[in-house]
Image: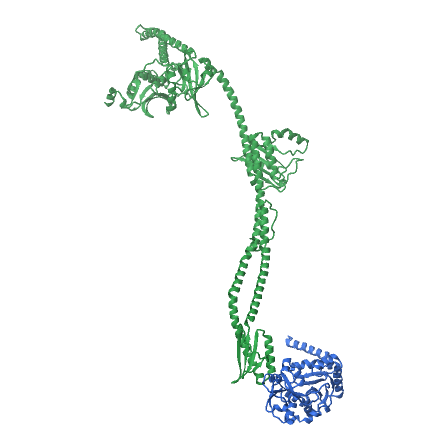
Chain colours: A green, B blue
Amino acid sequence: MSIRFKLLLPFILAVVFLGLIFHLIWLPEYLTEKEGNIHDQEAAYIEALAASLIPPLLASDLAQIHATLDTISARRPHWKSVRLFNANHEQLYPIDSTNSPAPNNLIAISQEITYGQEALATLQVALDISTLLNTEVKRIASLEFGLLFFTLVITVFAALLLDRWIRKPLKLMVNATNRIVDGDFNHSLQQHSSDEVGQLTKAIDQMQSQLQSREKETAFQHRVLEVITNAQSRFIRDANPKQIFDKLLNDILSLTNSEYGFIGEVLHEHNKPYLKTFALTNIAWNDQTREFYDENAPNGLEFRNVHTLFGCAILTGENVVANSPAHDSRSAGLPDGHPPLHAFLGVPFMREDKVIGMFGVANRPQGYDEALITYLKPIINTCTQIVEAYKAEQNRLKFEMLVREREVRMRTIVNNISEGIVSTNEEGFIEGFNPAAENLFGYLASEVIGKNISILVAGDHAANHNEYIANYLHHGKSNIVGLGREVEGIRKDGSVFPLEVTVSEMWVEGQRLFCGVMRDITERKKLDKMKQEFVSTVSHELRTPLTSIRGSLGLLTSGKMGDFQEKTKNLISIAANNSERLLLLINDLLDMEKLASGKMEFKFQDLEVTKFLHDAVEANQGYGQQHNVKFVIAASDTKLFVYADRNRMMQVLSNLLSNAAKFSPDGASVETAVNIHNGRIRISVADKGRGIPSEFESRIFERFTQVDSSSTRKVGGTGLGLNIAKAIVENHKGNIGFMANPEGGTIFYVDLPRVEPSALHPKDRLKSAI
Amino acid sequence: MLRIKPFGSTFVLLSIACFGLFFSYPSTAVEKVYKFGVVPQFDARRIKNIWQPILDAVSKQSGLQFELLGSANIPTFEKQFAAGEFDFAYMNPYHLIKAREAQNYQPLLRDIGRQLYGIIVVRKDSSIQQVTDLQGKTVAFPAPNALGAALIPRTEFGEIYKINVQPKYVRSHDSVYLNVLLGQADAGGGVQKTFNKQPQNVRDALKIIYQTRKVAPHPLAVHPRVPEAVKKKILESFLALGNSAQGRALLKEIPMNQIGTATMEDYDALINLGLDKYFLE
């Protein structure tokens, strides 16, 4: 059903409804009423007629009466019969006296004609009202037809108007909408009346133009996406930046309708940025520039002058839009022969506030604006990502090359190193086995890789190795990791040999590995044994005669063997001193040897530290006096105990006190103290000497170390004392150290674990209770 | 300040218009218009329909101007000619006698092809056979002084037959015949011409039992003040009408079938009949 018919339908229905009401309800009522009216009218007419007959009746003017009644009868065809009788009931009209009764469908009206009291005549009229009513019905029917015709005309007129005002514009709108659906936006409706239809038309036009612009926008965005997709797929497929950026530049030029342009990365030299192109439109304008382009474009042209339009983008990190470059203060001008520049757009590629590249395009006929940049945003981002990825790729390649070089170097080292290097995983299965290790164990790498390290280790070590690893992993307790552990290796042929293993822990790609550097120490062991035996032998062999020499010299210097001349005395004294010194040296060497060979025995006991310090000071007081130095014991805490070998600790303190006395100035005092430091018991000895030069600080506890040889000569000593002291203290689970004395000189200290009273032996506990 | 009043300007315009009219039609005011009267036997409109074309034709012929004066009824007409209001008048013969006595009107023209006489009608089924049977009967007449239909018969009833009738004046000849036909009168007086004009059924139902003596019919009389030359022109013009078919057709409506010159001698017989006695004022 058409809109036109829909709009007309209510009107037509209303007309039909009104017509039915008119015809079925109003008309019958009207006719009934009309019949009554006609009767009344006719009666009134007959009455008037009767009155008009009075004069001719009085004058017996029958001709007049006949003429009147003839005329009236002729005029009123519904008067089927008219009769006039005089007072004697003689018929006066008409001439014909036939007295036929009125038919049933006729209405008879009789009117008496009187003059004063005198009855003159009687007028009888027989009416056929149906004729009149028919006339009325015909009249109404014509009215109805007229109305119907009028309605038809109105309807047709309304239909035409609806057609013109609504259906036609709607049809146009439907066509326009269909065209829009088909993607044709080029037909404006143009007819914009001021009514709702016009407003709708206008709205459709507006919608059309909006859709058109959106479609353009969408097309542009599709093109942008296409460019991005192409660029990305090219980047994935073929990492040749030249080709990617050449195509990308062409796409950007095409998208922006630009004439020429470039894409490049921003590099730095001496902190100064410059541009190196990936892609550049060939705008060479003479042989020279053409040659230059052909030669350099493939590897990228470098533009060092950044005080230009494009340089502005690099320096500021802002987009550069210059639609009138000739008058732009940022422009540095163009070289002679350069193609004209009407408009320029430079867009930097930003990564975390740094310009990593940019593109520049030129000569868009309509110039450049921010809207275009907004549209190009996805491409700009893609360029940024590709430049970034390219740079990352370059770095990765460099790094890879470096790694490869290092790996080669490392492999060469590992392969050529004399130590065997065996790496295992957390479970102890061998993963690496270098040529030296092959030589060491007699296995080929292929024979041991994947096998447990235990096949290489003999005895308890082999059995416990896995446990060691488990302990280390779970508790961090290291039985294996560390330097220079000696174990027994087992060769493929089953022979056992001493092996020094240094195990280090390392992480490779998230996996923990243990790397053991192994050295066959069979020869060294032999040498050590020979050395120890030699030292022991030599010491004993030297000490025995030296003791005799010392004893003899002691007798001589004591004067018991008689007086000597002063000159002789001096010589004997020198000999006695040097033999004493030699004995000390031999003792120290023996201690060293004992400590090194682990043969030194310790008799641990609970030791009351303050008392022990008093004893030590007292025992060394004589030595102090020799150097004119006084040992002082500072107020110290009592009832502090350590678990120590009294003799060995006495040896340590003697060393510290003698050193303090040796290095103190004449007449100075050396302060000693016992206190608690970090939960441990600290015994300190502070001198007022020159202090330890910084270059010696790191070596002070090494063997044969003395501050300088001259001082050695002056103060004497073997250079082994502190080393022995350190070994003794460490055997007590303590540590020894030094620091500068704020009052000048040095403070040496020994920190030992404190023994709680509850941990004392019953005897010592009893003492501490007293 | 001088102001022109609207009335003043209107007055000037009206004056100019009247002045123009006056000079456009200088002769209308001085033309002699002859007054023409006609006996009101019919209603005024019918009279006008009959006579105006004739007067127009005569006027055209003679170059004279006429004014047709109306008369409300016959007594008025009689007073008018007695006062000499008409220059020319068409009247019945008895009126001519009265008009000559009063103003010396002279007959000029009449229908010379017939004569005027009265008739007495009764219903065909009536027992009345002759005039004497009418003694004491009701006789319908158009009017007391209708010459042919009433005045001559009544005069003859009284003077010749010596009978008395009950006159019933019913205004018109048609009424006379209808009264007789419908039994409202025993007999009726009329003239042959009107009887002939009755519908066939009326004529069939009636019969003529008597004819009166015959007299010259209605003359066109002229007042003696009208100059002879004018009289002559009028006479010639009417006679000229009688010579053309178109003119005769007009004259026939008067009715005047054969127009000719009338003289006073044509009406002498009437003067001797003694009509005055039966004339009702």
Give the quadrant of the C terminus of chain A: top left
Residue A454 versus residue A48 in the image, above or below: above
- Decide: is A294 above or below A580: below
- Picture quadrant where residue B50 is located: bottom right
Residue A695: x %, y % from top left: 43, 20
Horizontal and vertical percent position of residue A397: 54, 26
Name the residue nearer the viewer: A572 or B59: B59
Name the quadrant containing residue A592: top left
**Pick the front one: B88 or A61:** A61
Can see residue A604? yes
> Is B267 left or right of A468, judged from the image as shown?
right
**Furthest residue in direction top, as rendered:** A561
Left or right: residue A720 versus residue A16 is left
State the image coordinates of residue A161 (x, y, percent, origin top left). Answer: 59, 57
Residue A566 at least partly seen? no
The front one of A357 and A547 is: A357
The answer to which image quadrant residue B193 occupies is bottom right
**Image position of A718 with respect to A143: above or below:** above
Q: Nearer the viewer, residue A206 or A726?
A: A206
Q: So how many labels did they put on this image?
A: 0
Residue B166: horizontal and vertical position, in percent?
Answer: 59, 90
